[in-house]
């Protein structure tokens, strides 16, 4: 390691922590985890538990993400993903759904403000 890299590494290690997670568990991630626990009768205690469930039960996880995020669609999906296909085969996700991506990306913004300027 070069001297400059060593100095930079030491400086990073000496830096102050800028943020700690809220211990009151009021993040969106915690709200989502609580909803998953309630809806699936689980007891996921933390992020690692939620992550493990998302890997083991990915169709259910993504269906719950869709619901939790309040995705607006003109047609609901019939199937989240075909689990008979491998992920490496790039299966179709949310088959049958129809949605407007812009509507979903902008739905939480102030309705009286400009969302996009074009020149």
Image: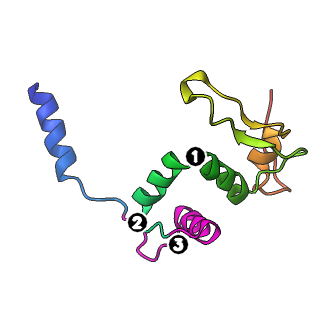
Does 112 appear above or below 59?
A: below
Kindly identify which residue carries mark 1: 58
Residue 38 part of the magenta segment: yes
Q: Position of residue 107 (x, y in %)?
A: 79, 52
Q: Callout 1: few (<14), some (14-19), or many (20+) C-alpha neighbours within 10 Å?
A: some
Identify the magenta region: 20-42
For image coordinates 16% across by 30% down, the residue present is: 5
Kindly identify which residue carries mark 3: 26
Q: Callout 3: few (<14), some (14-19), or many (20+) C-alpha neighbours within 10 Å?
A: few
Q: Nearer the viewer, residue 20 or 26?
A: 26
Which of the two discs, 1 and 2, sits closer to the camera? 1
Residue lying farthest to the top in this orientation: 89
Which of the two discs, 1 and 3, sits closer to the camera? 1
Determine the CA span between mark 1 and mark 3. Answer: 24 Å
Element class at badge 3: loop
Q: Position of residue 48 (x, y in %)?
A: 40, 57
Residue 21, disc:
2
């Amino acid at each position: 390691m070069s001297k400059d890299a060593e100095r930079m590494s030491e400086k990073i290690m000496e830096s102050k922590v800028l943020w700690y997670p809220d211990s009151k568990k009021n993040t969106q991630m915690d709200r989502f985890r609580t909803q998953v626990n309630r809806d699936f009768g689980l007891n996921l205690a933390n992020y690692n538990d939620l992550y493990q469930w998302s890997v083991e039960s990915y169709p259910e996880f993504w269906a719950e993400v869709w619901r939790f995020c309040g995705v607006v669609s003109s047609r609901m999906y019939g199937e989240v993903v075909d689990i008979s296909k491998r992920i490496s085969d790039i299966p179709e996700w949310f088959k049958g759904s129809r949605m407007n991506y812009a509507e979903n990306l902008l739905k939480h913004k102030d309705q009286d403000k400009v969302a996009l300027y074009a020149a």
